[in-house]
Image (spheres, rainbow, N blue to C red):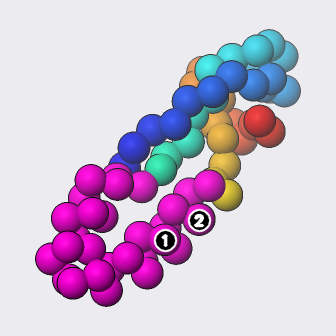
């Protein structure tokens, strides 16, 4: 998994913090897509879409944060 980072306001910490979320490992998915002659691309696309909708979390307390 790759990590995406940004900044956002944590309501629990009551301050601007670094926020993180997990994303897909694109290198691994590229290798799997090549090895399966393109069939894995469907799964890769679905995982990328679901990761884009994933929850951002505060790096200090771990609670969900709106970006």
Residue 28 left/right relative to 42:
left
- Which image quarter is the C terminus in? top right
The quadrant in which residue 59 appears is top right
Residue 57 left/right relative to 25:
right
**Residue 64 position within the rendered picture, expressed as x and y whole percent measured from the top left:** 71, 41
Closer-to-camera residue (44/11)? 44
Residue at image mark 2:
49
Q: Residue at x 83, y 16 (%)?
A: 14
**Residue 49 position within the rendered picture, expressed as x and y whole percent measured from the top left:** 59, 65
Residue 66 left/right relative to 24:
right
The quadrant in which residue 56 appears is top right
Q: Look at the image and say whether residue 20 sits in the magenta stretch.
A: no
Residue at image mark 1:
45
Q: Which secondary structure is most common in the magenta stretch?
A: helix
Disc 2 and disc 1 in contact, CB within 8 angstroms: yes
Q: Which residues are magenta?
A: 24-52
Vertical arrangement, residue 10 with respect to residue 26, above or below: above
Q: Residues within 10 Å of mark 1 (few under 14, many from 20)?
A: few
**Residue 62 position within the rendered picture, expressed as x and y whole percent measured from the top left:** 61, 33
Q: Residues within 10 Å of mark 2 (few under 14, many from 20)?
A: few
The answer to whether residue 34 of the structure is visible from this angle is yes
* Cα separation between marks 2 and 1: 6 Å
């Amino acid at each position: 998994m790759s990590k995406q980072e940004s900044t956002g306001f944590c309501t629990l910490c009551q301050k601007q913090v670094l926020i993180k979320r997990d994303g897909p490992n694109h290198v691994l998915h590229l290798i799997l897509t090549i090895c399966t002659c393109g069939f894995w691309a469907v799964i890769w696309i679905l995982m990328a879409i679901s990761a884009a909708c994933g929850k951002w979390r505060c790096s200090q307390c771990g609670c969900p944060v709106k970006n």
